[in-house]
């Protein structure tokens, strides 16, 4: 049966009032709440059952459900409801209330005005100003929509705090983008020797050594270049050493510094490695602080194994003990290091001239300001600009100019105003009461925020200007171009992160008592595995069924080592083939999912189950009802049971079983994976008396709600592929469509989602094909 | 202070936009900063998932959060024992809850801790929180009207909000969560001169006016749904204007100097002990320097699935994550495990209260002039009644302490809010479902 469990519409598998609910009410409730008696002023036999039409009835049914959940009804003297009946009653009420909520909050299938979220804002500011900077640093974290997305227009809110930081970020960015003054002096210096740095200074970078240099003269702003001449010394059976640069200074006790992303040194020949960055993004010594003056630049070897690389060697006082890595450790030899900065292509730099372009109008400040505004606003608002739109901004310029020292300063402030305007911060799509097709400019923005998480590029803009972007052939070609462009990594990262909740990793702390060898830095690699895995499916246009089971995964050196697989040698993620007895393949075996849905000590079958239902099947279980009694187990043996058996105990209680029989069985088959994401045959558990550990056998046996016996992960994957394939396809389509539209799906979208799903299945579940289908869909192209 | 001519059209325009945008009289803003003779403050600290409540017969009963014996002779159990030195400055309150929260989801009630609202409709619209209401009426005299902090920051999602504060229109007020950001706002030195900052503020003011004016035409083009969303923006512009004007007033008064040593301004979710302590330190400093008088701090929300605070107990050596501890309280060993976490949290409170108590102000202490409400909106996890609550401070404002009070379910928690607000400067105050004062708590 296609679409067995639909969450958006209760139409299939829904509970029917007349045949299922009413008989129970007649038998159990009408005696006191019916024709003859109306205890508590409640009469159920006449209570309207069409909740969509009757708000008061909705409230009453809501109360009925609470009374049932709390076992207040039937009253003590009456026999309690058999669980199956209770379940039908409460599920029916829930189903109807959900439908009401959905109808009431419906935007009629139209995309709601939405502002740029943090990531989109960051990308847009960077692309617009051409300056790398953390624009979103101070912005409050984004609210998550009910279905887990961060680009839902209805959920994204605005506040004065938000605006205040937009204002600040705009000023900072523009101060960098528009330069004043003459060509700055370039500081350049070459070092062939490291300073001693408490005996850790060295030309050979092993585990704890560093090549450190001090600059007494350096720029405080602008792009800088660090160039190192290095070579690797490989170690048998280990990955490549990684060169990492850091910039900072020495304070009283600590050395505040910021790190640049490490680079694999994959050759034993001498080579030049370059790092480019903007220096003001790093902690710089205060010019007045004189105790330890000077800027420090460190080079070290970021290769780490097992545990996180300690930042400081242990030991006290002057005689610092240096941890020397094992003999067999990949090393880097540093011959020299150069520093240069600020560096620029021309003066004024390109990003300056993109805004303040050369023009004959230049001497007439007012006229030039208008020209500058038109050009900048058109990019910032992502559409052509009418003359009258410029006037508030040019008015501001005219008022501000006499008070400011230079034209540049006044124009910076004027452009700041553009960057707090709603046309910039929101994807504004004018509309009236009727649905309409998007214009080409709007389509350009929809596309670019979907696939790049940023503003359209010049080509999209020019196609919009020609009015040809919406031509199906051109649109398809452009979509392909955008997918091939490296900016589409934004889509991979954002969509995967939000759909699969990869961020769960950061909310779980691994307990070292249980996993002494676990290196928290592995979490980064685990996230990388999932993102790159999805990226591989996306870019190679592979079947989405690989998400359930695959014969490969994407690993870097440290995660390969963690999994016990032969992976690549470097920190880049590469495709690694899997064999059946590796117990891996598919996203359910990814460390990110397993660890993120664990307690940090053990698996968490309930979390894992909810994750499967929510993320892979789009059938999230309802949240816990109010005032449910806790599991009151005083059995002293309880703590000695495996979680599987504890949950079985838990389900013996009627009030828990009602929901949990539909949840727990999905998580049990993953019991062979510990919190660290590794295969296990035993569960480590602290002894009851708190002393020492005990081991329990793993039992991944489970009976799914539909009665199917499942033993372990392989069975579960097989079951999902055989019995839930279409449900998964629909879930995946819904999630992708939700992300593409930036809003929650509603009843009116049902037909289109069905249609997209059917075509997605027809295309062998190929992800790129689905993207094209979504882009071509009517809803994506209309407001 | 003379107003520029472009102010008037803005007000006229705003009045046309909707009732939600009521604008305070600009005349008030231009007034000089009056020196209040005696600051009256309110501070709320919230923690999620309730506490350990083992039964009497249990050998873990000493981990029962509520004290033994009601009235003045109450005996602290283990979790709150650390409050013993402050016994005369605190009241323990039992049996209270928000009636509107009793029937909503077991994890949905953090949102209404300070609002008492019935979360209505599909949008789960909230209403104003106590701190924001007080701040709106009484917060004119400080550099910041109010300060909202939380572990997760931002606003979160409805029913899992990561802030305790809600504006007068029921919008969540985003909370700050990086200590350094809080520090910079409150005490950070500006790298620009007063002159250039004044110019910037003046520009900002002018900019915001023009943006509002221009927004009028944007709004007109939008569909109905979008207009509602857009009004959030307009409202934010209006609020930030107030803030800009306030900053202008305070421009010549340097920010207070505070001791940075000992503050872990870069603490984050990986170092929860330092993080919580630093936030409390910053709150103390905000109070001590009279930078604001209305503060909220949410030490985690009940979103086990997304709150970064979920892992705090495991990181701090309490064995399990927050949600598991809360769920395990009636399993063997569970009451003690959760009790120890309860105690850790109470120790943070005690530390904060003690700092306030140790600092003189007028003829009393800072604590005497600050009402601190500490608690959760679950008794044990999922249970929306019998909130565990500590009310502290405010002796010089008319509160009376030193006892453990239990209330019946007919007394809404809003009565406590009324009792506090009446003494903070809002006589005759009513709040949502309040029915009166709590005379047990008044001197």
Image: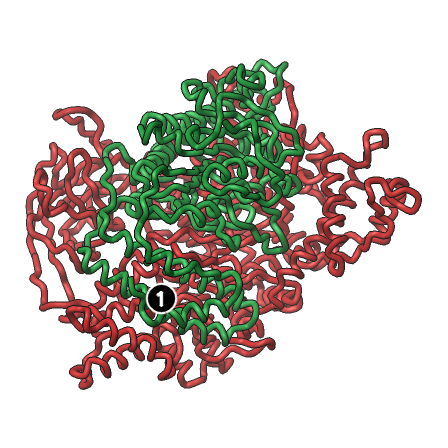
**Whole-percent x, y for residue A543 in the image:** 53, 60
Determine whether, in the image, residue A461 is placed left or right of residue A80: left
Q: Chain B shown in which color?
A: green
Determine whether, in the image, residue A103 is placed left or right of residue B242: right
Can residue A637 be seen here? The reply is: yes
Closer to us: B174 or A517: B174
Q: Chain of mark 1?
A: B
Q: Where, quadrant-wise, is the N terminus of chain B in this rendering?
A: bottom left
Q: Residue at 43% x, 20% y: name it.
A: B82
Q: Chain A shown in which color?
A: red
Closer to us: B248 or B439: B439
Q: Residue at 23% x, 81% y: name it.
A: A366
Q: Is residue B227 above or below residue B188?
A: below
Closer to us: A711 or A640: A640
Residue at disc 1, secondary structure? helix
Name the residue that disc number 1 marks. B208
Q: Quadrant of residue A354?
A: bottom left
Can residue A489 be seen here? The reply is: no
Neighbour class for label 1 at 10 Å: few (<14), some, many (≥20)? many
Residue at the farthest right position:
A36
**Whole-percent x, y for residue A73 in the image:** 79, 36
Q: Is residue A585 above or below residue A443?
A: above
**Whole-percent x, y for residue A463 in the image:** 40, 81
Determine whether, in the image, residue A659 is placed left or right of residue A330: right
Determine whether, in the image, residue A634 is placed left or right of residue A776: right
Total numbered circles: 1
């Amino acid at each position: 049966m296609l679409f067995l469990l639909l969450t958006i519409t209760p139409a299939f598998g829904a509970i029917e009032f007349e045949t299922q609910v009413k008989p129970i009410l007649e038998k159990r409730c009408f005696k006191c709440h019916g024709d003859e008696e109306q205890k508590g002023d409640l009469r159920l036999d006449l209570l309207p059952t069409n909740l969509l039409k009757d708000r008061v009835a909705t409230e009453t049914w809501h109360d009925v459900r609470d009374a049932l959940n709390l076992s207040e009804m039937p009253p003590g003297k009456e026999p309690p409801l058999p669980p199956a009946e209770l379940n039908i009653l409460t599920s029916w009420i829930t189903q109807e209330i959900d439908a009401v909520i959905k109808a009431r909050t419906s935007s009629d299938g139209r995309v709601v005005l939405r502002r740029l979220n943090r990531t989109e804002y960051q990308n847009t500011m960077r692309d617009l100003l051409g300056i790398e900077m953390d624009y979103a640093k101070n912005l409050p974290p984004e609210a998550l929509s009910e279905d887990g997305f961060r680009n839902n227009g209805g959920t994204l809110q605005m506040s004065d705090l938000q605006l205040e930081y937009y204002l600040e970020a705009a000023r900072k960015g523009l101060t960098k983008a528009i330069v004043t003054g003459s060509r700055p002096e370039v500081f350049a210096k070459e070092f062939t020797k490291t300073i001693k740095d408490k005996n850790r200074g060295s030309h050979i970078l092993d585990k704890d050594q560093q090549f450190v240099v001090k600059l007494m003269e350096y720029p405080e702003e602008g792009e800088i270049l660090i160039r190192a001449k290095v070579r690797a010394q490989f170690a048998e059976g280990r990955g490549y050493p990684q060169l990492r640069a850091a910039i900072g200074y020495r304070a009283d006790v600590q050395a505040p510094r910021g790190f640049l992303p490490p680079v694999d040194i994959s050759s034993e020949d001498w080579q030049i490695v370059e790092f480019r960055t903007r220096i003001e993004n790093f902690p710089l010594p205060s010019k007045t602080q004189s105790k330890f003056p000077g800027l420090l630049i460190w080079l070290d070897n970021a290769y780490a194994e097992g545990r996180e690389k300690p930042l400081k060697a242990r030991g006290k006082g002057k005689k610092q003990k240096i941890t020397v890595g094992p003999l067999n450790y990949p090393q880097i030899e540093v011959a020299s290091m150069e520093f240069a900065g600020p560096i620029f292509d021309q003066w004024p730099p390109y990003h300056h001239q993109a805004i303040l372009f050369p023009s004959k109008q230049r001497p007439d400040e007012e006229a030039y300001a208008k020209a500058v505004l038109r050009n900048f606003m058109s990019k910032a608002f992502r559409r052509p600009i009418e003359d009258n739109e410029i006037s508030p901004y040019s008015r501001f310029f005219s008022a501000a100019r006499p008070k400011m020292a230079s034209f540049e300063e006044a124009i910076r402030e004027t452009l700041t105003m553009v960057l707090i305007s709603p046309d910039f911060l929101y994807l504004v799509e004018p509309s009236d009461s009727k649905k309409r097709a998007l214009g080409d400019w709007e389509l350009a923005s929809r596309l670019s925020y979907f696939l790049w998480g940023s503003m359209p590029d010049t080509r999209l803009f020019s196609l919009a200007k020609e009015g040809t972007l919406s031509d199906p052939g051109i649109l398809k070609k452009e979509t392909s171009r955008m997918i091939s462009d490296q900016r589409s990594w934004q889509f991979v990262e954002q969509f995967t992160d939000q759909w699969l909740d990869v961020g769960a990793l950061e909310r779980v702390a691994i307990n070292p008592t249980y996993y002494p060898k676990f290196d928290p830095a592995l979490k980064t690699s685990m996230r990388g595995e999932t993102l790159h895995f999805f990226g591989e499916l996306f870019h190679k246009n592979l079947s989405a069924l690989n998400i359930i089971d695959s014969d490969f995964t994407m690993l870097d050196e440290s995660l390969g080592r963690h999994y016990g697989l032969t992976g690549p040698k470097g920190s880049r993620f590469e495709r690694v083939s899997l064999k059946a007895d590796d117990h891996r393949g598919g996203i359910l075996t990814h460390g990110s999912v397993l660890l993120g849905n664990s307690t940090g000590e053990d698996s968490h079958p309930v979390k894992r189950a909810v994750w499967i239902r929510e993320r892979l099947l789009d059938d999230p279980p309802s949240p816990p009802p109010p005032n449910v009694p806790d599991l009151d187990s005083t059995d002293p043996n309880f703590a000695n049971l495996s979680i599987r058996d504890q949950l079985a105990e838990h389900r013996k209680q009627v009030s828990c079983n009602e929901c949990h029989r539909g949840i727990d069985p999905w998580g049990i088959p993953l019991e062979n994976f510990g919190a660290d994401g590794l295969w296990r045959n035993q569960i480590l558990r602290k002894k009851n008396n708190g002393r020492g550990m005990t081991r329990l056998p793993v039992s991944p046996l489970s009976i799914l709600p539909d009665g199917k016996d499942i033993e372990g992960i392989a069975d579960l994957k097989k079951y999902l592929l055989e019995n839930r394939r279409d449900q998964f396809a629909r879930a995946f389509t819904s999630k992708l469509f939700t992300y593409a539209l930036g809003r929650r799906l509603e009843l009116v979208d049902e037909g289109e989602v069905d249609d997209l799903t059917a075509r997605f299945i027809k295309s062998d579940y190929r992800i790129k094909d689905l993207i094209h289908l979504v882009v071509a869909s009517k809803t994506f192209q209309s407001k | 202070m003379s107003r520029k001519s472009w102010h008037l059209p803005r007000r006229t325009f705003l009045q046309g936009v909707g009732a939600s945008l009521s604008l305070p009289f600009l005349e008030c803003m231009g007034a000089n900063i009056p020196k209040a003779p005696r600051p009256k403050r309110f501070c709320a600290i919230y923690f999620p998932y309730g506490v350990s409540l083992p039964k009497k017969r249990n050998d873990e009963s000493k981990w029962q959060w509520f004290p033994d014996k009601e009235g003045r002779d109450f005996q602290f159990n283990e979790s709150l024992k650390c409050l013993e030195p402050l016994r005369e400055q605190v009241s323990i309150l039992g049996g209270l809850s928000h009636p509107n929260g009793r029937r909503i989801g077991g994890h949905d009630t953090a949102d209404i801790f300070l609002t008492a609202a019935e979360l209505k409709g599909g949008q789960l619209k909230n209403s104003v929180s106590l701190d924001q209401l007080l701040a709106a009426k009484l917060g004119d005299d400080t550099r910041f009207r109010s300060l909202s902090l939380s572990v997760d920051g931002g606003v979160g999602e409805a029913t899992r909000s990561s802030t305790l504060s809600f504006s007068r229109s029921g919008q969540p007020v985003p909370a700050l969560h990086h200590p350094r950001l809080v520090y910079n706002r409150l005490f950070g030195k500006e790298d620009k001169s007063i002159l250039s900052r004044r110019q910037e503020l003046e520009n900002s003011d002018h900019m915001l006016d023009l943006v509002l004016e221009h927004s009028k035409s944007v709004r007109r083009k939008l569909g109905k749904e979008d207009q509602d969303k857009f009004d959030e923006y307009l409202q934010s512009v209006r609020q930030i204007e107030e803030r800009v004007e306030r900053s202008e007033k305070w421009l010549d008064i340097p920010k207070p100097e505070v001791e940075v040593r000992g503050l872990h301004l870069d603490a984050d979710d990986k170092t929860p002990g330092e993080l919580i302590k630093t936030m409390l330190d910053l709150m103390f400093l905000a109070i001590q320097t009279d930078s604001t008088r209305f503060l909220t701090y949410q030490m985690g929300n009940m979103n086990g699935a997304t709150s970064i605070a979920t892992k705090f107990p495991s990181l701090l050596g309490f064995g399990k994550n927050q949600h598991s501890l809360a769920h395990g309280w009636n399993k063997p060993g569970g009451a003690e495990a959760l009790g120890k976490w309860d105690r850790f949290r109470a120790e943070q409170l005690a530390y904060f209260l003690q700092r306030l108590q140790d600092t003189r102000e007028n003829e009393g202490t800072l604590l005497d002039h600050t009402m601190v409400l500490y608690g959760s909106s679950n008794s044990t996890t999922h249970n929306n009644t019998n909130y565990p609550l500590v009310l502290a401070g405010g002796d010089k404002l008319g509160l009376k302490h030193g006892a453990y009070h239990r209330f019946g379910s007919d007394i809404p928690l809003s009565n406590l809010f009324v009792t506090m607000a009446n003494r903070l400067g809002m006589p005759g105050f009513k709040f949502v479902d309040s029915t009166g004062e709590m005379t047990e708590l008044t001197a």
